[in-house]
Image (cartoon, rainbow, N blue to C red):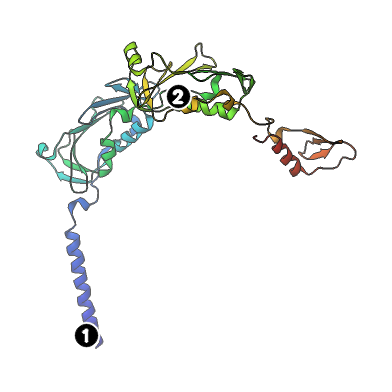
Amino acid sequence: MKAKTTLILAVVFLGLLAVILFVDRKKPEDAAAPEGKLVELASENVERITFDNGTETVTLAKNGSGEWGIVGPIKTPADTIEVSGFLNAFADLPIDRIVEKENADLKKYGIPSRDVTLKLQGTDRPVKISIGAENAVGRTFFAQKEGDPRVVLLPATLKSSLDKTLFDFRRKDDFRFETSNVTRIRLASPDVRWEARKTGGEWFLESPVKALAGEAKITALLETLSGLRAAAFAAETKNPEELKKTGLDRPETTVALSVSGAKEDHVFSFHRGADKTYVLSSESPRIIVPESDPLSELGKKPDEFRENRVAVFHPWEAVKLTVKKEGLSLNLAKGPDGKWMFGAGPKDEADGAKVEAFLGTGRASG
């Protein structure tokens, strides 16, 4: 009986093994492991990239400081993150599968429909990858590297890189500046006019009222200006024709910023059109349509920028405290050890937690 059971189990095992081997043989070729690299180079050695996406050709190059910029079809700063992501994708390029080893009919694979060319420092011959059609199976891409007779399939993960446009590569925060260097603000719009100045590290409103300004409120406004990002570039040059077209020949709102060390003010101009807002900066030749409309922040009244706390200080900065109420007078002082002591009569230690809580209440927002 045992021999018969063993024989049956052996037959079942052999049957399962045959099925596994059969299924393994029938695996589609696209499921095979990657077959090496089509391109493998150090991305930091690339000094120039040319990308033809089938509609436009974008050329990027490093400057003397190693920063990426767009040099064709226009000259403008590049988005470093976008360029780095694109470069890394093609500098280390795995082959998903080899389709043909040589003498292939490239038209059959739609090669070339797009091209990527990488120029390395100290070399005359660039690395050029010609991209073809998208393979329906696995959403991979047919491709061939110049000088390599093979037609290969490249990973589907390249799709986002292959869909890049000139706009994607452009730097969108072209108006950015260092907010901490601003020493004066002058804002003018049809309904609002005010001026503020930084003195001794604190912001003060100077007109139409004189008052201490809320540092966080002023900082928020400056960060709104510095953080402007382009949803579109309305014009590359702010010539009279473009200024008139966008309404910026007569801007509705202007903000002039005095910056430490600068001879002239940094001026922002805004005009709200029928369906979009246009912005220009004196520090940039371009006119942009921002991702979010900043005019709501810029339209705040001067009183909204006033400091509304009773007193402005950090509780831990206080070293003496006098409290007078209904004939009662308390004097406290903080010692070198950080402990609060009553100053009159016996040197009794005060409840430090209660003192700190009281100081915090004295500066709370109203």
Please identify the quadrant where the N terminus is shown: bottom left
Q: Which residue is drawn at 62% across and 19% down?
A: 209
Residue under the point 20% across and 46% down: 97
The three-letter code of the residue at mark 1 reads Lys
Between 138 and 23, the one nearer to me in the picture: 138
Residues packed near mark 1 inside 10 Å, few (<14), some (14 to 19) or many (20 plus):
few
Q: Nearer the viewer, mark 2 or mark 1?
A: 2
Q: Which of 127 and 168 is in front in this view?
A: 168
Along the horizontal axis of the image, is 300 left or right of 130?
right
Rendered-image quadrant of the C terminus:
top right
Residue 246 at least partly seen: yes
Q: Can residue 103 be seen in this view?
A: no
Which residue is under mark 1? 4
* Residue bearing mark 2: 176
Residue type at the position of mark 2: Arg
Depth order, front residue of 124/276: 276
Q: Is residue 15 above or below residue 127?
A: below
| Element at label 1 | helix
